[in-house]
Image (cartoon, rainbow, N blue to C red):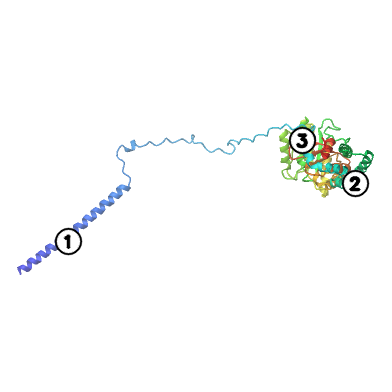
């Protein structure tokens, strides 16, 4: 019995010891976990500053007052962008002798006419078939039927009288006859002098169909006049074509000429009137008026062109009306010329793109059609490629003479 009690006591003591060990292990684990959590918290949480640390830290920058803070500039106060520099005023090439200087450019396209005629006239026997070839050559160059027949008859007569024909004789003969056909005695002066009222500048009206280079011609003519020492005002009366006024104004700025313009789609007659008034007030020598490029089939627009001329003439007569024709259009240009001549009194012809066609005979044909001379010719895209027409230089370019 005692043994049984002893065994029971030992078992109770052993069980108590084991329970104490388990509880102690759990407490140790809890303490360890607590220490780990405190360590993590210590690592992540900012340390509390100790006494004196705030004073030792970087001082905060002084704050600016509201007066010191610059406010964004308003649109009115913002500095204006620098204005674009005005283009330098150019000195145009002298107009005198300009066609002679450009003759090589002209002869490249025109010499086929003269050389073809010289080749035919150099044949030993000039029979009817040869004379027909000469006629065809002239007609192909747009000389026109009546002038061609006249020239062939004169050539046949002179060749018959001449008899023996050397190359020099033929060249001289052809040059003389072509020069007669072109008309060396016609007055080819561009009249820019005032007629009638002495207190008004000369007025030049520039007319023509779209695409002939009318606005460009007006600008180039301004350069020709400036080169001759004239003061010029440009009138941008082509109010229907987009950027026409800008284009003309650019030409004017290059030579120091003022451009008078109106609103897009405005009354062309009003702009033309204002241009003449501006030229008068400024004491200018010449006013050049660029009109809208009107299709000759549109009666209303042609009537408007007549209105422009009538309104301008309230301040005095128009001194020159120049019709701009594209030399490459040939006979179609003659149709345009007829219609324009019915609306306004054409006093001179400007042939543009003459260097781009072998049909130089249009010079003769258009003069015959209108009874007025070719006064200016365009021989390229350059600013100074508009030249006063000189018959001798033109004929020499045709036949390749010196």
Disc 2 to disc 1, C-alpha distance: 146 Å
Mark 2, residue position: 131
- Any mark on residue 388, and which? none
Disc 1 to disc 3, C-alpha distance: 122 Å
Disc 2 to disc 3, C-alpha distance: 45 Å
Mark 2 surroundings: few (<14), some (14-19) or many (≥20) residues within 10 A: some
* 96 vs 394, nearest the viewer: 394
Looking at the rendered image, the quarter that the C terminus falls into is top right
Q: Is residue 5 left or right of residue 108?
A: left
* 93 vs 233, nearest the viewer: 93
Sooner in the amino-acid sequence: mark 2 or mark 1: 1
* 387 vs 111, nearest the viewer: 111
Q: Are marks 2 and 3 in contact (CB under 8 Å)?
A: no
The local secondary structure at tag 1 comes to helix
Mark 3, residue position: 222
Residue 135 drawn above or below residue 255: below
**Residue 130 visible somewhere in the drawing:** yes
Q: Are marks 2 and 1 in contact (CB under 8 Å)?
A: no
Image quadrant where residue 237 sits = top right
Residue 64 drawn above or below residue 293: above
Image quadrant where residue 116 sits = top right
The local secondary structure at tag 2 comes to helix
Looking at the rendered image, the quarter that the N terminus falls into is bottom left
* 106 vs 71, nearest the viewer: 106
Q: Given this view, does label 1 or label 3 mark the residue nearer the observer?
A: 3
The local secondary structure at tag 3 comes to helix
Q: Report the residue at 77% width, 35% height from top.
A: 222
- Any mark on residue 19, and which? 1
Image quadrant where residue 155 sits = top right
Q: Given this view, does label 2 or label 1 mark the residue nearer the observer?
A: 2
Q: Report the residue at 28% width, 52% height from top.
A: 37
């Amino acid at each position: 019995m005692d043994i049984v009690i002893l065994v029971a006591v030992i078992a109770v003591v052993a069980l108590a010891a084991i329970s104490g060990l388990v509880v102690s292990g759990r407490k140790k684990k809890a303490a360890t976990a607590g220490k780990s959590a405190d360590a993590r918290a210590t690592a992540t949480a900012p340390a509390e500053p100790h006494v004196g640390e705030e004073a030792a830290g970087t001082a905060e920058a002084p704050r600016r007052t509201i007066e010191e803070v610059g406010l964004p500039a308003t649109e009115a106060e913002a500095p204006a962008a620098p204005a674009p520099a005005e283009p330098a005023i150019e000195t145009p090439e002298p107009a005198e002798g300009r066609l002679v200087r450009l003759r090589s450019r002209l002869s490249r396209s025109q010499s086929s006419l003269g050389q073809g005629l010289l080749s035919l006239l150099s044949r030993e026997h000039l029979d009817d078939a040869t004379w027909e070839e000469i006629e065809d050559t002239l007609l192909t160059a747009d000389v026109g039927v009546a002038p061609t027949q006249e020239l062939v008859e004169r050539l046949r007569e002179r060749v018959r009288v001449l008899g023996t024909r050397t190359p020099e004789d033929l060249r001289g003969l052809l040059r003389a006859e072509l020069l007669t056909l072109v008309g060396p005695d016609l007055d080819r002066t561009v009249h820019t002098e005032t007629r009638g009222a002495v207190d008004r500048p000369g007025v030049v009206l520039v007319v023509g169909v779209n695409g002939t280079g009318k606005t460009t011609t007006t600008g180039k003519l301004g350069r020709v006049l400036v080169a001759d020492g004239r003061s010029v005002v440009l009138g941008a009366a082509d109010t229907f074509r987009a950027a026409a006024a800008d284009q003309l104004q650019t030409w004017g700025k290059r030579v120091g000429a003022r451009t008078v313009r109106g609103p897009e789609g405005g009354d062309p007659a009003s702009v033309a009137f204002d241009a003449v008034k501006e030229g008068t007030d400024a004491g200018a020598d010449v006013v050049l008026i660029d009109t809208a490029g009107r299709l000759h089939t549109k009666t209303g627009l042609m009537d408007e062109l007549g209105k422009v001329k009538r309104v301008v003439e309230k301040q005095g007569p128009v001194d020159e009306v120049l019709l701009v024709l594209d030399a490459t259009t040939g006979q179609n240009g003659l149709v345009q010329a007829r219609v324009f001549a019915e609306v306004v009194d054409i006093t001179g012809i400007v042939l543009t793109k003459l260097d781009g066609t072998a049909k130089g005979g249009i010079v003769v044909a258009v003069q015959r059609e209108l009874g007025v001379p070719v006064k200016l010719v365009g021989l390229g895209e350059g600013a100074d490629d508009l030249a006063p027409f000189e018959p001798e230089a033109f004929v020499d370019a045709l036949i390749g003479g010196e």
